[in-house]
Structure formats: C-alpha cells, structure tokens
Image: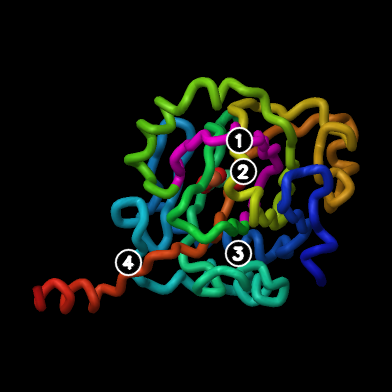
C-alpha cells in the first residue's frame, strides 16, 4: 500500500484518505476499550486527551499510549510512512473526540505544538469534515489540544474566519484514515458543521468521492449522522519526562 495512491485530488497539498484502514472487528474492539470515565465534556462534544492534556498547551508529559490505541494501527502508520518525517517518527498523543448527531467543531487549525501531520481514524458514523483555505497572515490558535480550557477560545473564535463558507468537504466513513500533512496542515482550517444530516453529497461536492470505501451508501446524496468517535494521532514536538522535571527542578 502506498500513501500517494490515496491523495485527495483538488485539495491543497496534502490530504490522504484511506477507506477501511481498520476492520469492523478492530473498530468495535477499540470502541469497547475507550474508557467511559475519562471524557471531558465540552458544550458541543466530548473529548479525551491521551495520555494526558498538554502542559501549557504545548508540552507532553512522557507516557506510553495505551495498547488499544497502539495495536494494530501504529504499525500500519509505519508501513505507510505516515509519521516518517516527524521528530519522533510515530505519534505520541491522541485526542479522542465524540460527536453525537448535530454536534461538531468550529473551524480551526491544530497549531504549532504538533509536527504537521494528523492521522484521524473514524469510528461509528460518517460525517463531512469541512476544509477552508486560510486567509494569508491569519492565525487561529489550536482549539482541541488544550481540552476544556480551550472551549472559551472556541466560543470567541475569529468571527470573520468562521463565517467564511468551506471550500471543500471530505466525507469520513467509519474505519477510514484521513492524513492531513505538509502545507495543508498550516494553510487550511478544518471543522465539522453542527447538523444532523449531511446533504448534497456527490462526486462534485465531496473531494474524496472516488476514494470512498462504499459510495453506494450515499447514493441519495444524504448522510444521516450517527454517533461518531474520531481518534486523532499526533506527534507532540516538546516532550518532558517526569524524571527530567524532578531532577531538573531539584538542581536549580
Ligand atoms: O474529529 C475530527 O475528525 C476532527 C477533530 C479535530 O479537528 C481535532 O481534534 O483537532
Ligand atoms: Fe483539529
């Protein structure tokens, strides 16, 4: 399997969409293992930061990812070379987002705490991710990384930016992998509309239509939202080990 074969055409470089990246039984096994007591509730969705929320929004306290987030996907990322260009060459942080029908996430960018590669696995329902080309020079801070604290920022996000219509839609099916990298990571915003039905779905309006696993599901042009969980894998640039914190602190 070659990542280049899965490049989404017509979008800023580079997005890749791989349908059926995991099997249905792998999907249900992961869903069962997501801990039910770790959710942070935001007004529009719930999330978990694993292994933990970044310190100051930028620094990961080193800890391994739990096995259910490692197997089988990390080896598959390696086979595809998804994180080959990032400093740790594999992800060290996962944001788990849950969206019920009608829930979404404001347009945002993921920001400079991470290497510019996000690998998103979708579980449960399908929905459209909306991509907007960023205006030159504009900056919108990362929304998801800081968990609960960032909710305020989400609410007060730059109105001009969020009011602009999306340029492209990527339809994410359950069990698919979406990779956002290179210029696309820094030159576009992504968001999910708070709607219960995605409408007008077709080869003309969905950028990854030709790459879908089963486009016949969407033949009527509609997707009725079901509960969806996304696993967004990232490589946090700054990692601090607990030991270096303790000893570094004691020496000063
Ligand atoms: O759920 C998704 O696919 C997107 C989530 C997201 O953008 C984020 O957590 O930063
Ligand atoms: Fe994001």
Circle 4 packing at 10 Å, graded few (<14), some (14-19), many (20+), is: some
Identified at 63% across, 70% down, the residue is: 73
Which numbered mark, 3 or 2, is in the foreground of this view? 2
Residue wearing tag 2: 187
Residue wearing tag 3: 29
Residue wearing tag 1: 134
Which numbered mark, 1 or 4, is in the foreground of this view? 1
In the rendered structure, which disc, 4 or 3, sits on the residue that comes first in sequence? 3
Residue wearing tag 4: 61
Identified at 56% across, 74% down, the residue is: 89
In the rendered structure, which disc, 3 or 2, sits on the residue that comes first in sequence? 3
| Magenta residue span | 120-144
Circle 3 packing at 10 Å, graded few (<14), some (14-19), many (20+), is: few
Secondary structure of the residue carrying numbered label 3: helix
Q: From mark 3 to mark 2, how far is it between C-alphas?
A: 35 Å
Q: From mark 1 to mark 4, how far is it between C-alphas?
A: 31 Å
């Amino acid at each position: 399997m070659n990542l280049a074969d899965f490049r989404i055409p017509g979008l800023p470089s580079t997005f890749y969409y791989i349908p059926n990246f995991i099997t249905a039984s792998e999907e249900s096994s992961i869903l069962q293992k997501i801990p039910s007591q770790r959710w942070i509730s935001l007004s529009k969705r719930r999330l978990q930061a694993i292994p933990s929320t970044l310190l100051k929004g930028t620094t990961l306290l080193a800890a391994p990812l739990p096995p259910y987030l490692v197997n089988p996907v990390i080896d598959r990322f390696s086979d595809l070379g998804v994180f080959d260009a990032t400093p740790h060459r594999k992800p060290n942080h996962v944001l788990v987002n849950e969206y019920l029908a009608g829930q979404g996430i404001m347009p945002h960018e993921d920001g400079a705490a991470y290497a510019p590669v996000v690998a998103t696995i979708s579980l449960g329902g399908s929905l459209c991710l909306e991509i907007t080309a960023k205006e030159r020079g504009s900056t919108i801070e990362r929304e998801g990384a800081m968990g609960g604290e960032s909710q305020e920022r989400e609410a007060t996000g730059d109105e001009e930016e969020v009011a602009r219509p999306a340029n492209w839609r990527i339809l994410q099916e359950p069990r698919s992998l979406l990779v956002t990298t290179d210029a696309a990571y820094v030159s576009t915003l992504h968001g999910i509309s708070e709607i219960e039905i995605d409408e007008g779905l077709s080869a003309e309006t969905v950028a990854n239509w030709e790459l879908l696993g089963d486009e016949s599901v969407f033949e009527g042009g509609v997707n009725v939202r079901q509960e969806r969980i996304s696993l967004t894998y990232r490589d946090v640039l700054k990692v601090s080990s607990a030991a270096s914190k303790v000893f570094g602190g004691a020496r000063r």
